[in-house]
Image (cartoon, coloured by chain):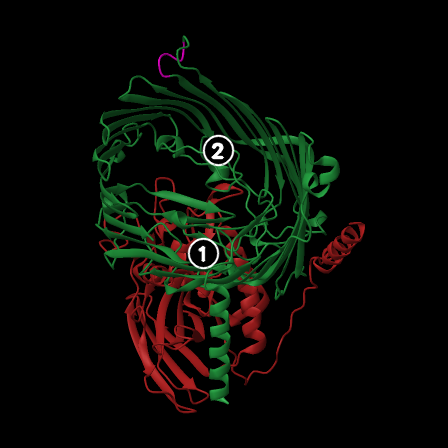
Amino acid sequence: MKKLLFCLGLLVSTFSYSQIKDIVESIHGNFQIDAQYYNKDTSIGAPIVPQKVLSNGFGNINYIRGGFSAGIRYESYNPVMQGFDPRYQGSGIPYKYARYKNKKLDITAGNFYDQFGSGMILRVYEERGLLYDNTMDGFRAIYNPIRGITLKGMIGHQRTFFSLSPGVVRAGDIDISLNELLDSLWANKKTKITIGGSFVSKYQSSQSPTLNEPENVGCGGGRVTVSRGNFNIYAEYANKINDPAYVNKYSYKNGQGAYLTTSYAVNGFSAMLAGKYVDNMGFRSDRDQTLNAAMINYMPALTKYHTYLMATFYPYATQPNGEMAAQGEVQYKFKRGSKIGGKYGMEVAANASMAYGIDSVNIAPQNDDRQYHYKVRSFKPGEKYFHDFNIEINKKFSKKIKGTFLYSNQYYNKNIIVENSSVKEFANIKTNIFVVDVTYKYKPTSSIRFEGETMQTKQDKGAWLVGMVEWWPQSNFFLAVLDQWNYGNADQSKRFHYYLVNIGFIRDAVRITLSYGKQRQGIFCVGGVCRTVPASDGVSLTVSTSF
Amino acid sequence: MIKLFKIILVITAVNLFAGCDYVNTPLKPHTVVTSNDTNKVYKNILVEDYTGSTCVNCPPAATELDSLIALYGSRIVPMAVNAGNFATPVTTYTLNLQCAVADAYDAFFNMSNTGNPCGMVNRKGNPFSSKYLLYPNWANTTQGIILNDTAFIKLTLNTTFDTITKALTVNTTSTFLKSLSGTYNIVVLLTQDSIIGPQKSGTQGQISNYVHRFVLRDAISTTWGDALVTGGSNNGQAIAKTYNYTLKYSYPAAGTTNNPGNKPAVPCNFKHCSVVAYIYNATTNSTSQYEVLQSEQKKIYP
């Protein structure tokens, strides 16, 4: 029998080889190891790390042959570095897949990432830097029955650290490009319309001794994209049935979310306006999970994505239990040779974003037979959570000197965003942030960059000053020195300097960085659970490569 | 084309109806079952609440622990472990409820690092990370133990306490009701109930006269206890152990790791103190390592 199977295998492999020997074959992947040595530093509150050295590492290997691909990712935490969820513990292969794709069908067995629409109903993705990974482990099929229609179906469990979420997720999506589908009538129309619809259902058994929990919870929605020339509009609406969970305090109220974004762009000018309404739209494949675990959907914050340290000091995250938010941005490029643009031109971007709670009122327990816990009074903004009004100017002064200048005015409701508390314990934080970033490129492959930042505030930890010098003597080597000084802290004994020295080497796909310095403490809260991201003082090393 | 749309509509409709459970009556009827069998040995449930006085979401977890006691009575052995950043005294929350054994458990089981409020129920859970439970899950796990688990060990506690010298003697007797393989340790701890002090709340702000219940104050044995058996037990095997301890005037004691600066500690009212003892599986590499098999508590001044 074994001989027969061996001969059969040989025959199949020989036949397969002869069929696909001309098909392109490749293996590629990437590796990254981060490690840190921790010093004891009680002055900034850095805890003692008994192991002294902690590390995170991963390696991806992918094999591709024609329409077939397969891959794995090995991860190892020995133990996980401070600031990350300690449930990442040990080593393993949490990601493995095999995929086959042709013109009509694309099928995956194993792990996969995907997104429906804006992600309000389903978004499975990974963000290595944050150790966020909610990959699905199951099956997915994508089918194009006719031109203009894409059908998707998937079933599986989501990853939670090194195990799987108890809830099984079943999801389907249809995307229709009307211009492609009705090509005889619409192919040449300037207006392009795409419509789509999704439905996601999760099943999780219930063992609650006190609640009749729904074991099947569904969330469905539709979306439309209309574009004409330089104008684009996208709208999406989603509704979720009763989904009592830890993050919504086991509320049985239906959830709903709406998202609208529109943009217009012509040569040198662009404008964007977006709005969002969210009410009880947290959706997880484990009703008892919190923080970043087992999230089925994702609702990005409608705020500008800043890169400067002080501008991201008080970051905002969407409040899935209730939020109204809006964002607008205008960008204009003053042409070269114009009065304002000067010899090299100038770019100006003005952005405004704001987020509020929804106008709701709590229901007294004795009147709350349906366990809604609250009701929405009106479609008006409630308590203010956040705003960011900012303007950024990018200007090239000469062939060798260019600069970026940023001003940002921010408002941060710490009680809601950090403490998840309706009590006004902390004053709302109002900040004015100024950034000057100038690069002097003294040789084609050499430059030096100066960055100065300050955040002026009377609340929380007070004002900060940041200075950085980043020197690139060659295109593959850099040295950076950074200091963050909390000079405005009301407690004079806490006016710390958080300095950092960073050396990096880059050649082809290899990147090695070594840094020494201090990191400040923070608190990370999501859905009623808070975790301290401890301060640290030590040496860290990152090695990464890809092939 | 129309046919295709019809098929899609039917599939979507089937999905919509199959994928949703509408619940009209969210609350289950409240039932209390009482057993009159006084000879039977029941497995008690050690419920650990990892908390801190600046943790805004922690008061509901303490309420949940009270609810479990109201429902299951003495089957619940409660313990509030104040540890981690939210238990560290700060300007307006000066109450220091930390202790070395609380820090050790918190760090070892990754509780506050993962996020407060949280806890463990008989330290059940495999893999290790699944021992971490948010408080709404305590009731499910507790009910599962009540309905399904059998007591393999009987634990009796006897204490004598001298109110003048503060000398406390704890006599434990652990009787194996079944032959078990592996290593089993006993741990004896001191808890203090009803400590009045400030607590941060997400709904009420600072509650200045909050009642901190079942607070772990010190280890009477060592942190991880003493071995009862190391190579398995025999059915009926009884092991007696005695622990002598002197109550301190206040906790944490000045000069200890949790009170290096001799900050004001909390006076120890012995009338509110209890001994908590638990027996756990200490077998290395066992899938149920650290799981608590039996626990008891006894007031030292009844």
Q: Where is residue A174 in the image (x, y as percent from the top left)?
A: 67, 49
Q: Does the magenta stretch include residue A341?
A: yes
Q: Which amino acid does label 2 sit on?
A: Asn
Between residues A368 and A139, which one lies in front from this camera angle?
A139
Can you tell which quarter of the image residue B13 is in? bottom right
| Circle 1 SS class | loop
Query: What is the x, y in percent for residue B170?
Result: 34, 75
- The residue indicated by pointer 2 is A413
Amino acid marked by disc 1: Ser
Image-based side of B163 in relation to A136, left or right: left
Q: How crowded is mark 1: few (under 14 residues within 10 Å), some or many (20 or more)?
A: some
Q: In this view, does A144 lie to the left or right of A293?
A: right
Q: Which chain is tinted green?
A: A
Residue B25: percent from left, percent from top: 73, 57
Tell me the subunit letter for badge 2: A
Q: Does residue A30 appear to the left or right of A295 in the view shown?
A: left
A510 in relation to B46, above or below: above
- Magenta span of residues: A340-344
Say how many tags the image has.
2
Q: Quadrant of residue A286?
A: bottom right
Distance from the alpha carbon under mark 2 to that under mark 1: 34 Å
Horizontal placement of A330 versus B54: left or right? right
**Chain B: colour as depicted:** red
Question: In the rendered structure, the residue with mark 1 lies on which chain?
Answer: B
Is B50 above or below relative to A302? below
B119 w.r.t. A331: above or below: below
**B24 lies above or below B296:** above
Q: Nearer the viewer, residue B26 or A178?
A: A178
Pointer 1 residue: B194
* Residue A302 in sight in this render: yes
Give yes or no for contact between labels 2 and 1 (Cβ–Cβ under 8 Å). no
Q: Tag 2, which secondary structure?
A: loop
